[in-house]
Image: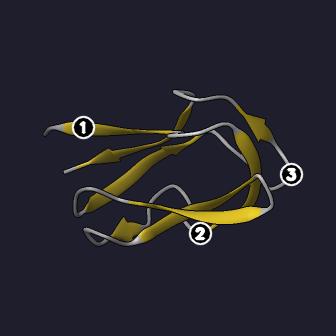
């Protein structure tokens, strides 16, 4: 099966994590929300698949390109 690594598109603070390992996520489904420059930025899944790894938690600070989750499809 193919894998999709979801990376942070911008630096910021993780507000919410909407998936857990074992979840099925739809294409366009909400993975997490990152707060940057006082704006909330939804991070959406580019593919439909099963969540295999979640590497973040609420309150965590992430950098651009940091791995957020791994989806197998």
Q: Which quadrant would residue 5 be assigned to in this image?
A: top left
User: On the image, numbered disc 3 is attached to which residue?
Assistant: 59
Whether residue 27 is situated above or below residue 6 in the rendered picture? below
Task: From the image, state whether disc 2 or disc 3 is nearer to you.
Answer: 3
Determine whether, in the image, residue 25 is placed left or right of residue 34: left
Residue 53: x and y, percent?
49, 42
Q: Residue at x 51, y 55 (%)?
A: 21
Whether residue 59 is situated above or below residue 31 in the rendered picture? above
Residue 63: x and y, percent?
67, 29
Determine whether, in the image, residue 61 is placed left or right of residue 2: right
| SS under mark 1 | strand
The tally of labels here is 3
User: On the image, numbered disc 2 is attached to which residue?
Assistant: 18
Query: On residue 14, which mark appears?
Result: none
Determine whether, in the image, residue 6 is placed left or right of residue 3: right
Sequence-first tag of 1 and 2: 1
């Amino acid at each position: 099966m193919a894998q999709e690594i979801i990376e942070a598109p911008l630096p910021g603070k993780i507000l919410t994590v909407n998936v857990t390992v074992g979840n099925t996520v739809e294409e366009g489904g909400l993975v997490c929300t990152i707060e940057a420059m006082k704006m909330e930025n939804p991070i959406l899944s580019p593919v439909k698949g099963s969540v295999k790894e979640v590497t973040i938690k609420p309150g965590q600070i992430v950098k651009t390109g940091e791995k957020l989750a791994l989806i197998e499809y």
